Image (cartoon, rainbow, N blue to C red):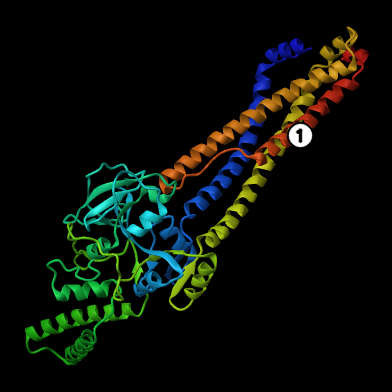
Amino acid sequence: MIGFILADLRRLWLGGAVVVLLVALATALGVAVTLQERSLRLGSARAADKFDLVVGAAGSETQLILSSVFLQAAPLPLVDGAVLTRLAADPRVAWAAPVGFGDSFSGYPIVGTTTSLVGNTTTGFTEGRIFALEGEAVLGAAVNLSMGAEIKPMHGTTETGGHTHTEIAYTVVGRLQPTGTPWDRAILVPIQAVWHVHGLGQNHGHDHGEEEGVDHADAHGGGHQEADHAQAQAQVKVQVQVQAHGDGGHHEEGDTHSEGEAGHDHAAARTGTQQGQDEAPVSDVSSGHAEADHHGGIDADAPIVETFGEDLPGLPAILVKPKTIADAYRLRQEYRSGNTLGVFPGEVLTGLYATLGDAKTVLSAVAAGSQGLVAAALMLVTVIHIGQRRRQIGALRAFGAPRSSVFAIVWLELFFLVALGVGIGFLLGLGAAHIGAQLFTARSGVILPVGFTGEDLRLAVFLLSFAAVLAAIPALLAYRQSPAAALRA
C-alpha cells in the first residue's frame, strides 16, 4: 500500500506541491504572529527587569518608560534635580541613579548616568573598567567601537539635523558584558559630563562668563534671578516707549530708531525666555537650541563627583531601586503627586501588552480566516481529484481491494500532504519570527527570545487533527463508490 501511495504522489507531484505550499503559507502566518508576539512580551519584560521604579516629571507614563528604560529618544519634561538628592538620601532607597540623554555618536545614544547604575544593572566588563574621569566613556556590548576610541557627541541625531560638539571628546575605557537590553547599544558617560557639555551644573563654565552661564540656565529650565526679571521688565518698558514714539510720528534721528529696534528685539527675546519659564522644561533631542546657547565644555581629566547637592539641573528621569516591595509602593505613591511621576515599568508594559494582545487577536483572526480558505480550497481540490480518479478506484475494487484499503490510500495521501505542509509552515513561521526579532533587536537593542513552547505543540496537534478530519471526507467518498459504477464512469 505504501508503495502504491508513493507512486501515486510521484505521478501527481505538481498538484501535491500546490497543496503543501498552500497549507505551509497559511500555517506560517499564524505561527509567526504567535511567536513574534510572545517574544516581544518576554524580551521587553527582561529588558525592564533591572529597573523597579522610574521617577520623572509629570507627563506620559509610557513615554517616560520608553525613553528611560528602552532608550527611545523623545522629548521629556525635566524633573527638578532636588528630587534626586531626596531619593539618594531616602533610607527606603538602595540606590538612585539619574539618566541624561539627548546626544548620540554614530547612531548610538549617549547616556549620562552614575557608577551605581552601571554596577547594579550589569554583570561586569568584558574589557576595561568603569569611567572615573569626566572625559571617559563605557560602551555597551553591542557598540561597534574599540577601546581607546574617541567619541565626539552629537546633539540629537543625524536624521534630526543635530550638530556635533567638535571641541568635546570622550575616551572609551571599558566595555560591558551583554545584558540583552537596549543598554547594550548605549554609550555611558558620567552624568556630570552631560550637564557640563550642555552648560549645566556647578562649576561647568570652563572659561565661560557669568552672563553665558545665566543664558544656559534659562535655556534649560534654570531659575531666573530677580535682577534678570527686573531687567526684562525694564526692557519691555523701553520697547513700549520706543514703539509709542515710533507710532506717533517721524523719528528725528536715525540712531534713536535703531536703538528702539534693538531694544524691541532684546526685550522680545528676554520676554520669550521669561514666558518659557512658566512651562515645564523639556529634554528634546530635536530641539532647536542655538549652538551658542547649548555648548558648554568638560574637563576630561576632572574626577567624577556623585554626591549631589540641592542645586542640580533638571533631569529627564531617575532610576530607583527600593529596598523592599513595600518601599517600592510607598515611593511610587509619594512621587505620583504634584510635578513628579513615579512609575513601575511593569505597569506600563502591561498596558502595552494589552495593545499587543488586541493586535494579535486581529492578526490571528486573519490567519484563521486564511487557513479556513485554504481548507475550503483543499476540500474542493480533493473532491475534484477523487472524481477524476473514479476509474482507478473502481479498478482497485475490481481487483479485490477492500473498501478499507481504498479509504486508507486516499486518506493517507491527503493527510501526508497536509501534515507536510503544517510542518513546513511551522519552520517558515519560526524563520519569519527570527528575522523579525533580529530586525527589531538591531533597531532597539532588545533581544527577543524566539522559540516553541507547549502552546505551539498544542497548536500543531490541533492542526494535524483538523487535517485528519479533512482528509477523511474525500476518503469516505471513495469508500462509498461501487466498483461497477466507477468502471462505467
Where 315 sits versus 366, above or below?
below
- Residue 161 on image: x %, y %: 28, 56
Q: Which residue is mark 1?
A: 466
- The one nearer the camera, 449 or 131, is 131
Where 469 sits versus 218, above or below?
above
Q: Secondary structure at mark 1?
A: helix
Where 231 sits versus 390, above or below?
below
Q: Quadrant of the C terminus?
A: top right
The residue depicted at 69 percent of the width and 42 percent of the height is 369
- Residue 302 on image: x %, y %: 18, 60
- Residue 7 on image: x %, y %: 72, 11
Q: Quadrant of the N terminus?
A: top right
- Residue 239 on image: x %, y %: 20, 87
The residue depicted at 55 percent of the width and 50 percent of the height is 41
Relative to 27, is 348 on the left or the right? left
Relative to 343, is 367 on the left or the right? right
Relative to 478, is 230 on the left or the right? left
